[in-house]
Amino acid sequence: MTIRRGKRLAAVLVVCAAVLAAACGGGGSGDSASSDKATACPVDALKDAKAPVEITVWNNYTALAKRTFEAMVAQYNASQAKVKVNVEPQGISFEEVLRKYKLAAEDKKLPNLALLEDTTTQVIADSGTIIPGADCYAADESSQKILKDFLPIAVASYTADGKLQPVGFDVYTALVFYNRTHFKQAGLDPEKPPATLDELRADAEKLKAAGVTTAGKPPVSMVAASWQVEWWLTGVKQQIVNNDDGRKALATKSEFRSDQTTRLFDFWHKMVVDGLANPVPGTEGQTNHLFAMATNSASMVVESSAGVNTIAGLLTGTVDPEELKSLGINVDPATLKFDLDLNVGPFPGLDQPGQGQIGGGAWYLTNGGTKAQQAASWDFMKWFNSTPQQVQWALAGSGLPVVQSAVDDPQLQEKWNTTLAGKWNKVAFGVLQNVDTDFPGPLIGDYKTTRESIRGAYERVLLGDGQVQPAIDEADKKITAAAQEYKKTVGG
């Protein structure tokens, strides 16, 4: 996997900002959008349409994901005459899409399909703005094959109130990206990434001792992002909120104050104090931790797998940085060169490799259009969820396949075994398979406040006064207050 192509650094950084921040850096919302309650899914309403039914689709795709999705939509539109899908991008982050979705709900001008972040599952289920996916799959006998083909962790993660809420998924996991050259220089095995946080520290100590980074910078670049804290806690089955992490009943109390949270915060605080990790604030669109990797100022970083296809494409020369301009990403050609030998490993867990939860987004079918539009939206999503389209999306888009038949496809397997992006995605899919379907992560109504509270505590420990327990206690109180307020809002 050695890469010596001299690709432009600016292109990589902008792509990371657009793709990675959109994937896992958002916050979810604690406000319920207002609309009429969802009704049963009218899957047969398209049959009587006299003219092509137009539907509007919202998403936040950028780079290769944007190009691939729009090409797939064009392919679907050309394949039949009943439906015309119109794609309307709503920015580059899930937060942007959600803000516009809430305004559209208030104005009763919802799109027909919307891609929303994983953190919004509970609030969207409570909002009365969607037709639950479970209703559509129950109403359409021909969709049962797809439902049974879905990866169990996707269904488990996006089930709320006993029902599958979305009609489709766009999922990611997390990886540790590391510099193989630095590993070799430090006497480490360049084919053996750290599997746990303890191993990450041990590797960091050797990297620091070898002085492999620019100007002796700490070998681990890290962002104080709430989602990473959540993943580490979920990986060791530590609830963030009560009621089985909000899975058995609406969460009403924080469980954030725990021995596992203290253990995690202590670990990273010591990494910073000992000069092994360089933290940056977990603000939306943060790229300084990625910049450190690109300039050899760091040897390792933990990040989302969302940008794998684009980043690997830039490294191997299969994606021209100039092409990114046509995708809405402006790149200055007269910038620094990108010259790294990178590899990836599974998300390093507290105890074992690959422990975490699912990330990304889900496709929701709204109840704002006509019955014919709802049926048309369902038809498109059935097409998108089918094996050939999931293979295409996994090969050229940004997400991982969500149906087992796509995973087993020979074309996908060949790419996963022979190309850089494919090998990285194969590692990411291994993390996805490792997530426990009985403990997939929290369902939280006011996820926005929860994430802000966790991030605030994390930043205080890493970038502030370093007081672990007071930071955890403060976040715990805020999460409980937000959960109780949310319960009042939804009338629980």
Image: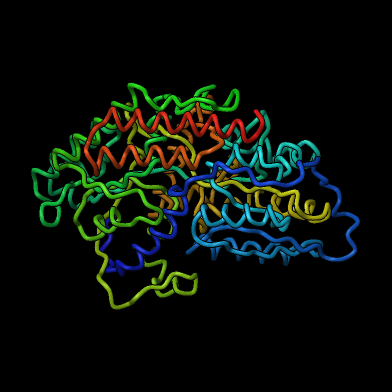
Which quadrant: the C terminus?
top right
Q: Please tell me which residue is depicted at 28% across the width and 53% down the height of the picture.
A: 289
Which quadrant: the N terminus?
bottom left
Percent coordinates x, y for residue 234 in the rendering: 43, 29
Percent coordinates x, y for residue 129 in the rendering: 70, 46
Give the left or right position of residue 28, taking residue 475 as reference.
right
Percent coordinates x, y for residue 462 in the rendering: 25, 41
Percent coordinates x, y for residue 143 in the rendering: 74, 42
Give the left or right position of residue 50, taking residue 356 as reference.
right
Q: Please tell me which residue is depicted at 26% across the width and 31% down the height of the picture.
A: 468
Q: Please tell me which residue is depicted at 24% across the width and 32% down the height of the picture.
A: 467
Point out the residue furthest to the bottom here. Answer: 334
Q: Please determine whether, in this image, residue 45 is positioned above or below residue 324.
A: above
Q: Nearer the viewer, residue 284 or 192?
A: 284
Q: Please determine whether, in this image, residue 85 is positioned above or below residue 265.
A: below
Q: Which color mode does the image show?
A: rainbow
Instruction: Please say whether residue 409 is visible from this viewpoint.
Output: no
